[in-house]
Image (tube, rainbow, N blue to C red):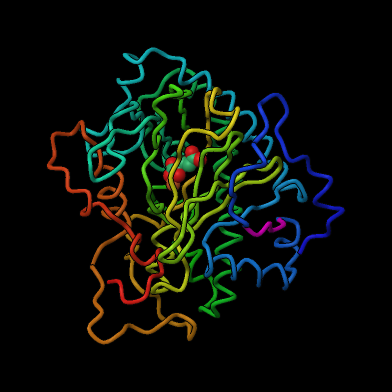
Amino acid sequence: MQSQAKQKDIPNNFPGIPPFPDDVSTAPLLRLSSGKLLEGDSAEHIRLFQASTDIGFFYLDLSDSDQGSSLLGDADDLFQVGETLFELSTEEKKQYDFSEQNSYFGYKAQGAMVVDKQGNLDRNEFYNVSKDDIMGISDPLPAPETLHKSRARLGSFMHGSHAIVTLILDILNDQLALPKDTLSNLHRQQAVSGDQVRFVKAPPQPEDDRRTALGQHTDFGSVTVLFNRLGGLQVLPPGADAEWVYVRPLPGHAIVNLGDAMVKFTNGLFRSNIHRVVAPPGLQAESTRYSLVYFARPEDSAMLRRLEGSDLIPVMEDGQTEEEINSKDWIIRRALGRRVDRGNDLDFEKSAGTEQLSRRIKDQH
Ligand SMILES: O=C(O)CCC(=O)C(=O)O
Ligand SMILES: [Fe+2]
């Protein structure tokens, strides 16, 4: 545990926005320290391993290391960029929707995706910016002026997020006693991958019609680094009787979670928690909600299958089979499979990830 004194130094609410209410259930996520993780504090490394196996979600205090603080600074700047970006006209934003070209980078309008099997539509806009585009690994995609002007900041944020992800992967690699660099070699910054920054905007919903803004899902990739100001994110803890609980955003912290690839690499040892976004709780429901996310994903050509070389990774059970699929195809199937604007036959289950495993309900296959 971090000392009480240390935790008290960090304010619980963000200045200038309505407070997160105290009377809603929240997830008791571990708060890990970026400073301690970087210093090689072995107790903190064990806590990271625990969080990865139990819940797959944790807070990362970025305020206690230089590397973390600089990432927080970039995130603050990009929150401003996100606000300006979404102020563009719908007509202009739609020019940057590349889903017709089988790409999930660029813009997704509100209501372009289903949130459930019933076909209800989402209530948030996305803008996804490719790491490879910003790092000069792929040709640049057409983008609005606001993003052109922010390429340096985006690059710095991507670099900082990728470094934090690499730190997490290296510690987990060590905890699993996998051959050195097994995980980081599947996530080289200069390799072609689906890594992206996502800007999210969800406007306030009418009081008499508040619904799920972003449907329940597990993240598709390896590690997600999320910055929130307003509540609304909820996680479904493991177990048959689990109920949705909010993740309270904390100043100075990122919310970090593992995605499907980490479940597949460890044959279910690590957990990718189901989460969704609903209207912000209490007084916060009147405000527009913005989030900023870095999604780290395995390199496009990486096969999403059980890794060899660790005694901690469960062996395949009799009759258990693995789908032969690489990271690129997995991400495309998951990212575009629930889009309603592509004229494809929507099959909700076909675009599912590791949700069943995430429930951790015995005898459920
Ligand atoms: O906006 C958030 O808080 C979470 C967004 C999210 O889960 C996602 O984009 O995958
Ligand atoms: Fe997510």
**In the shown orientation, is residue 171 left or right of residue 15?**
left
Q: How many marks?
A: 0
**In the shown orientation, is residue 87 left or right of residue 282?**
left
Q: Nearer the viewer, residue 69 or 59?
A: 59
First to last magenta residue range: 29-33
Q: Nearer the viewer, residue 11 or 44?
A: 11
Q: Nearer the viewer, residue 336 or 51?
A: 51
Residue at 60%, 38% in the rendered image:
156
Q: Give the quadrant of the C terminus.
A: bottom left
Say which quarter of the image contains residue 298: bottom left
**In the shown orientation, is residue 66 left or right of residue 133?**
right
Magenta highlight: main SS: strand
Q: Is residue 174 magenta?
A: no
Q: Position of residue 205 (x, y in %)?
A: 44, 24
Residue 131 visible within the image: no
Q: Position of residue 213 (x, y in %)?
A: 40, 34
Residue 306 visible within the image: yes
Q: Position of residue 343 (x, y in %)?
A: 13, 34
**Does residue 360 lie above or below 81 as drawn?**
below
**Does residue 118 lie above or below 149 as drawn?**
below
**Does residue 14 lie above or below 273 as drawn?**
above
Q: Position of residue 1 (x, y in %)?
A: 76, 64
Q: Nearer the viewer, residue 63 or 53?
A: 53
